[in-house]
Amino acid sequence: MTLTASYETCRRLHARFGRSYYLATRLLPAWKRRHVHAIYGFARYADEIVDALDGADDRAAALDRLTSRLATGLAGEPSDDHVLPAFIHTVRSFRIDHGDIDAFLRSMRADLAIARYSSYDDLLDYMEGSAAVIGTMMLPVLEPMPGREKEAREPARQLGLAFQLTNFLRDVKEDLARGRVYLPLDDLARFGVEEADLGRPLVSPRLRELLAFEAERAREHYRAALPGVELLVPSSRPCIRAAHELYGGILDEIERSGFEVLSRRAAVPHHRRLAVFARHLAAASSAARTDRRLGTEIPGWA
């Protein structure tokens, strides 16, 4: 497995499973894209281990193997894995915090044993590893403005949380089929929703109220993330603005459907996705020209 092939594998994983964010990455400078794909590809790789294998023992063993291969790779040993060479190269290139990687793997392991969360605080603890740290791992690649690195960290966390909570609302039916409920049990009880209601063909009035409540929580995370865009270098801003808009668009579609997430899977229409991309394309081109102008001549060189 060459490094080039590994990056291409990650790109394909991103294109297949993360269409909204993948489209937004087309607004990044080319050299940044592959590193974003590597982080997404690794996260998706681990997520598929947890979701796709049949038995809990098989999933645990596969996750153990991935964790071990990653540790030896980060220690400098060559890897013949399809995804890890690109991810390890990105981690080293940007000095990505290994603590974030450990937190992510802990949340993946939690999915093997924990299928319900009592409160939103409990769910946030899980999402810290499964989503918030994805935002902070992306941050060095997206490149905060000099001196704004610490300030940019919290908005990056918030964007990861917003994206994942949107996924949880969209995928209520799919998650239940896997035996998981990511809507906090305290909230189900508050709105008088039974778990059986999540498996019915249509959304009940009480479930609709619950989903609207959780959607507003997601909106709060989106609002908290937005100030972070201006903390990034100009060439990364169009990508994150587009991703914010596209993922927020999934939430729009959920609301527009009357929260009918049990009978359909919300998605941003193709024409709207292209319109968002086109609207930010000019800004991306302008930012790329700005980046080029920031380059300086070396004194004494012709």
Image (cartoon, grey):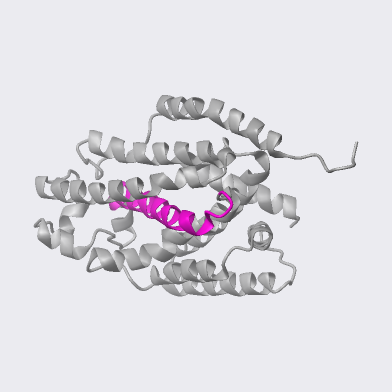
Is residue 283 positioned above or below 139 on the image? above
Instruction: Tell me if 174 is positioned left or right of 295 in this view.
Output: left
Does the magenta run of residues contain 286?
Answer: no
Picture coordinates of residue 48, whole percent (x, y): 49, 58
Observer-nearest residue: 92 or 296? 296
Does the magenta run of residues contain 171?
Answer: yes
Query: Can the viewer see residue 245?
Result: yes
Picture coordinates of residue 220, whole percent (x, y): 29, 49
Is residue 114 positioned above or below 287 on the image? below
Is residue 185 positioned above or below 281 on the image? below
Quarter of the image containing the N terminus?
bottom right
Observer-nearest residue: 285 or 267? 285
Quarter of the image containing the C terminus?
top right
The quadrant holding residue 125 is bottom left
Query: Can the viewer see residue 265?
Result: no
Picture coordinates of residue 89, whole percent (x, y): 69, 59
Residue at horizontal 53 percent and vertical 58 percent from the top: 137
Picture coordinates of residue 258, whole percent (x, y): 19, 37
Residue at horizontal 58 percent and vertical 36 percent from the top: 26
Q: Which residues are the magenta region?
A: 145-172
Please, what is the dominant secondary structure of the magenta stretch? Answer: helix
